[in-house]
Image (cartoon, coloured by chain):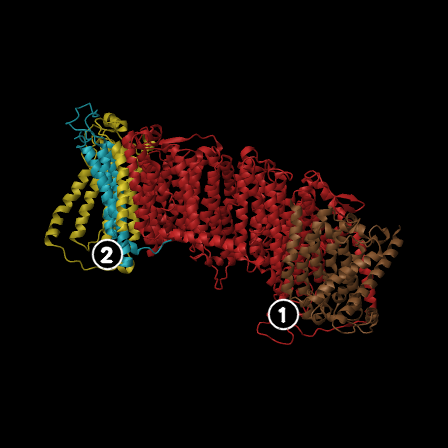
Amino acid sequence: MNIYVKIAYTFLGLMIVLNWGMLMRVTFRKIGARMAGRHGVPFRQPWIDLIKNIAVRTTLTHGVMFYLGPVFRFSGAVGLFLFMPILFGKEAWMNFSFEGDLVLILYFQLFGMLGMALGAGEGGQPHSAIGISRGLAQHAAVELPMTMGIIALAIQYQTLSISEIVAAQQGGFLHWSFFTNPVASAAIMLSALGAFGYSPFNLVKAPNEIPIGPPTEYHGTYLGVLMTSGNILGVMETILFMNLVFGGATNWFELIIKSFLIYFYAVFVGMVFPRFRIEQSVAWFFKIPLLLGFIAILMYSF
Amino acid sequence: MEFINLGNIGLIIGFLLIIVGFWGVLTQKNIIKIIIGFSILNTGINLLIVSLGYVKGKTAPIIDATIATEGNYNVADKIVDPVPQALVLTAIVIGFGITALMLAYAMKLYKAKKSLEINKFNDLKW
Amino acid sequence: MLKNTLMTLVLLVMAYLFYGLYDGYELRDSLSGISEHFATKGAEEVGAANLVTAVVVTYRGFDTLGEVTILFLTASIIAFFLKLKDEDFEKTIEHRDTSELLETASKILIPVIFLFGIYVFINGHLTPGGGFQGGAIIATGVALMILANPNIKLNYNVIHWVESISGVSFVIIGILGILLAGGFLDNKIIGLGKFGELFSAGAIPIIYSFVGLKVGAEISNILNKYQKSQKEL
Amino acid sequence: MVTPIYIVATALGVGFAIGVLNKLGRNFTGGLVLTAIAFMTFISFQWFAGFYSGNQLPEYIFTAGFQPPLSINLLMGPFEAFFSLMVNAIGLVGGIYMFNSLKERGSNAQVVYLILLMGLNVMIMTRDIFNLFVFMEIASISIAGLILLESGTRSMGAGFKYILATSVISSFLLIGVIFAYYFVGSLNIDDLITSNLHLVKGGSIAIFLIMMAVILELKPFPANGWGLDVYEGSDAGLSAVISGASASASLYVLYKLMAIAGPEWNYYISLLGAITFVGSNLLGIKQENTRRMLGYSSIGQLGLLTLIIGFKDILGENTIYIAFGILISHYLAKAGLFWLSGIIKSKGLKGWSVVRKHPFFLFLMGTFVFALIGFPPFPSFFAKWTLVMDLTATGNIAWVVAILFGSMMEAVYLFRWLGYAIKAENDHIEPVKIEWSKIIPVWIAALSLYGIGYYTAQLSEIGSGINFIPFLFVAVLLALDFLPIFIKNTLAIAGMAYYFYTVYPSLDNLRLIFEVIFMVGGILALIAGYAYKGTRSGFYPVAILMYAGLTGIIEANTTLEFFYGWELMTAGSYFLIIRGKRSMPHGLSYMLFSIGGAYALLAAFGMAQVSQISSDLDIINHITYLPQWAYGLLIAGFLTKTASVGLHIWLPGAHGEAESDVSPMVSAILLKAGVFGLVLALIGMGAADNQFSGLAYTLGWVGAITALVGNLMAVFQEDAKRLLAYSSIGQLGYIVFALAIMTHLGWLTAFTYSINHFMYKAILFLTIGAVVLRVGTHDMYKMGGLISRMPFAFIAVLIGIIALSGVPPLSGFAGKWLFYNAVLDKGWYFQGIIVFFAGGIAFLYLWRLIHTIFLGQLKDNHRNVKDISIWFAIPIYILIMGIMVFSVKPEWVLQPLGEILAPYFPNGQVNWVAGSASTALGYWSGTKVFITVVGVFAIAFAFLAISTRKAHKLKQFDIVFSGERPDRPETTHIAWNVFAGFYKAVWPATIPLVEKFWDKVTEMLHDTAGFTRRIYSGNGQAYMLHLVLFVLVTYLVIIGG
């Protein structure tokens, strides 16, 4: 398959992912609203927001880094998509995952965060800096148990290549890591909560924390780009966990179901539990999830 | 009684004097007394030296008519050992020198602090 | 209390050490080692009737040089140690005036004492005695002078000249030993002469005279310094 | 040949004559005395020269024209010639130094000085034991007199104590001598030797007393209070003579009489020596008075020498070499220091900050201190080396430990002193006035130290291999110190470039990597130096000294050369570090840890030589004698340089407080020396699974913990440079860990990290340093918003932190990727996780660094700072080029690295297909990733740039303090304690356990010293009691049993 066709497919995939992400977001906003007895936004809201933001006439800037921020964020999200095999066995939907393996994915997540942190920083708004410091701290805490789980899987399947991990899980749901390696999966999925950043771990960008946090200063096109990348990222996270724990997907339908459920799981927890303060959430990840990750690795150390 | 002879007696007394001297040197606080202690100590040592030179029933190592005849001055079997007597002379002189120096020090130290207590002079320590 | 116990302990251990030495001693009934040689050959090798002098001045002359040096050292050290400041120097202190007896006695005795001292060191190679003894005797004379007249002013120049000249000539004789005879301080630079006479035993009488003078001078010097340094009080 | 008897004759003749000649005035007598000493020196010199040229036989000098034992005889042999030369030479030079103080006391004092020297000469030469006694008395009486040159009760007291002590000693000696005569019938030493005196009943006690007296003359610990008081109380010149001449003479007397005592005494002599060496150096660390401290040091050195001659049978012909090296260094250095202490009036150590006003004093003082501790190129270095080598080779480990511990203690107080001199805060410094008669002797001492040092190196056949060229270069720079920076800097760079050009062909690839890091890195760091003004006095010699050491390590073929380079590097870096403003304590702790490490290496090298008599560096590849310990020591030694956890406390201060362009030198470059060492050691231990895998495993954990602790500490720093310093600790932790993995991948990781860390840490330190130069503070919360003022600095830091954090696509990711593969195929999961977590934490401090300094609000006082100096920018951007190349084409670096490592670890290499790497586990193609990311980035950038082209640029308005103005503004600044929440969660991990540990150790040592030294009550009687007790206890130990 020559490179242009490849790029075309990839672009198409990106579009699907983006829209699916927006759809999921709005769905859950509605669910949340209904639970709270409100009517909630119409389904078209995200698209409206996006177009409005991009079309906004007046924009402000604090300097170069200020708008490099969203760029970083966006490239981070798209890069994540590019290096992730979307559908197992469909060469068209493997994107550029042949360029790098799990390690690349793990570290590439940081790319977006970095840009975000710096960009918001130049805004000069102290609150955004506070938000970032919280975000980084929480991320460091989340990463530990998650990586332990992921490493455990890598050991289990003796590979760092996502495609091969997925391949190893084919043939009935009992082959999923979720069942073959429950401990590691538990560690991953618990820390996944932190990765999604819903309550109780949404101190960084919860609606009523907005005055504190990166998005404070961003508006217009910046915000548009941020939202876009946010939606892509959301889906990519789910796909990552799907690939690692739930046997990946062989067709779009399966992908949509699985990603929806994983996303639902995150939101569901969020609906139930109140928000943590930062030290609470950090400490939380250092308790159960860390323990699980520890055990998961321990099983392979002997 | 085997040890009743100049040699052993000299040794015993010499050692006793040395010990007495050390006692004085180590216990007396007054500098002058310490110096006296030293001269007792030296006397003891000198006594040791000469007694070690003693040979049973021999006379002083000076050749005169009583022990030597004209022309034959071999007195090997008549005299005690001359060497320790020479050494003791040196030892005495050295002792004298040191005592003199100590006394000079004593005078100056007394002038400095109007006291001869040795434990007053510990400006330098540790 | 503790201190005394410690001290007793120390002295006991010391006694124990000395006992070890005493234990190794037994009375000799004949000479041995080098002393035997001195007793047999000493007379004709050195020519001094007083073998002790022979050993002191010749065989172990180097030690004697050392002794002289030590006295000299002490004198010099005391000299600059007890040196008076100029304002003190002129001071005179009121001594309780000495007894008639002492003054008269000193007038008579001092010359005799000096004479005796000289006799002792000149005959050092024949009779008991020698340079140090003689020198010491002379010094007692000086001591007597000082006692008799506490404010006496001794003539420094004389003392110094005597001291240096005799010291230097001692060394020179030693060096002559290297040049003319067997080695440093050899007494055979001049003939041994007739055994038992006054002018015999080579350079010994000369050396001993210098030693005597030097010792006498140095001790008197020291005594004098002690006396003077009272002014500083 | 003038017969040596004239030494005596001259001294006494002149001495006696002066009694009358003093009429001619003190200058005349003084001149006369000096001439006499000069003549004496000439005599002993011509003899020494004769023996040295080899065509001169030992000669007996008889007195009184009789053969010994009848008469007293002297011996002039090679040793006698050497020692009497030492005595007379220092007598002459010291005489010049003391000319005025002697003069003011009058001709008598001058005579006493002359006779002291004469007495020492005879002590050395005489072969008659009673004569020895007489002249020992002469020597001690003259010293007792000369102490009075210094007026005042203190010195009088000291003098009196001295007389008391020596009288006690001489009484013991006399008793011993007379009994010896009684048993043997002769006083001649040779007779005493041939007669088996020690077999005679009671004879052994006579010997005991004689030996005791001689040993006591050397002021053994603890019976040496009197000696210390003399050193403290007497005139500086006299102290020099006592420590140089009198002590040496006594030492030789001991050596001479050991023949009588017989071999069974050797052990005890060494034991007493060791006790003295350790004891007095331990007590030395408590001293605040310079003279007394030097006294402790002298006594310690003498103890060491006693120890050495006690080992003469075991050390064989090396004894002379060793003893010579240590003695001569002590002799010259100590004399020099005492002389200096006479010029610089201050009694206390702190007062020495005066020398800052006189750079050349600083040079002299440094020379002497380093000579005493045994740094190259001084004789003591080679001597100590040989000593330790031989002792370990003969399995006397315990002794080596004692020696090294003692030397360590000595280093503690000497370097603290040096530190005070260079740095101590002291507002009222007035320069001292310089008398030439006092300066010249010091210079003579210093210069001869260098000369003799070179000569000593040539004496030993492995020493002769050492390359002194770099050292000459240092000397040249020192001489040119007055020139302006521009010239010196150019000179230094040119020199290094040329040197690199000449040596690099001779190096194998492994070494070449490090040589490039050291040399090229060094040149880059030096370029930044152009930014400074003035002459920057003293900077270039020490910098070049460090680089000389570094390249010396690389080129070393023998263990000695390696150690030589190692010590040079330590010395140079110490001076570089201590140049910083508040870096005095950190410099000290750096020095102490380095020396400790160096001694560990020393011991290890010694153990390596046990099984294999070779000095080749390869011997560390097959150590068979206690290999676990040997390799353990090697690794520990190198870990002190890589600042691994437990040994790291020196680093933050040292790097944080150093000057702006020094920090990159010591952080990015110097630390790699430790890595290089580790590489050698691990190669020596051989491939992973053998008896040493346990060692490697431990090392792995050490590395992992270091990584975590370092990064964690970095997160909580308020000071930018300390933050980077802690980050260096963490990074080095990665490297150590990766090395410990001991597989191809592991080492590939380690080398990748080394190269990367070199580049980005240099970038970061240079940039931050340059920024600090502009804004004049390290505290991050005092900066902010600088991006608008210094965009170039910002970009540099941005690149630096992206690379450091390992985010793709920059080169840092290469390390991370290799790291995962290495860990997984090794199976060290937990350590791996810890290191990974450390990496996550790194992100926190990196963000803090760049955000707090460059983003946020601009401070009022920085409204118009300029961008970083061009001279800093040049090296920074060169390095950025490097990172970029590495990022675009990782295979250009990684493939050759793999080939270099293949010989050591053939299995499990990375296989490359068209620029994409793959291992058993994973795959990665750097170039493509780079292109992809950059592509996406460009698109997004273009889009945003276009869509916000009309964006309105906001002006800053002050919202930093959210409108209020609290009393401690920094607390409300967001950058202050910015990770408070995180801290609350992880604080237990940040408790400074290690610092606490080392504090306790120091405290313990000080308490011990402080308690022990109270035996020196200053009471003369107590001192005498010590002497007697010393004798009696030893008696009970040796014979009483």
How far is disc 2 from disc 1 in space, using C-alphas? 79 Å
Residue D653 shows up from this direction: yes
Chain letter corresponding to the colour yellow: C
Is D956 placed left or right of C233 in the picture?
right
Q: Nearer the viewer, residue D929 or C78?
A: D929
Q: Amino acid at mark 2?
A: Gln
Q: Nearer the viewer, residue D465 or D908?
A: D908
Vertical placement of D572 versus D853: above or below?
Answer: above
Mark 1, residue position: D973
**Quadrant into which the N terminus of chain D falls:** top left
Q: Amino acid at mark 1?
A: His
The chain letter for the residue carrying disc 1 is D
Residue C160 shows up from this direction: no
10 Å crowding of disc 1: few (<14), some (14-19), many (20+): some
Is D807 placed left or right of A5 in the picture?
left
User: Residue at horizontal 40%, vertical 38%?
Assistant: D269
The secondary structure type at the circle numbered 2 is helix
- Of circles 2 and 1, which is in front? 1
10 Å crowding of disc 2: few (<14), some (14-19), many (20+): some
User: Residue at horizontal 35%, vertical 44%?
Assistant: D116
Chain letter corresponding to the colour brown: A
Mark 2, residue position: C230
Q: Nearer the viewer, residue D882 or C98?
A: D882
Chain B, colour shown: cyan
Chain letter corresponding to the colour red: D
The secondary structure type at the circle numbered 1 is loop
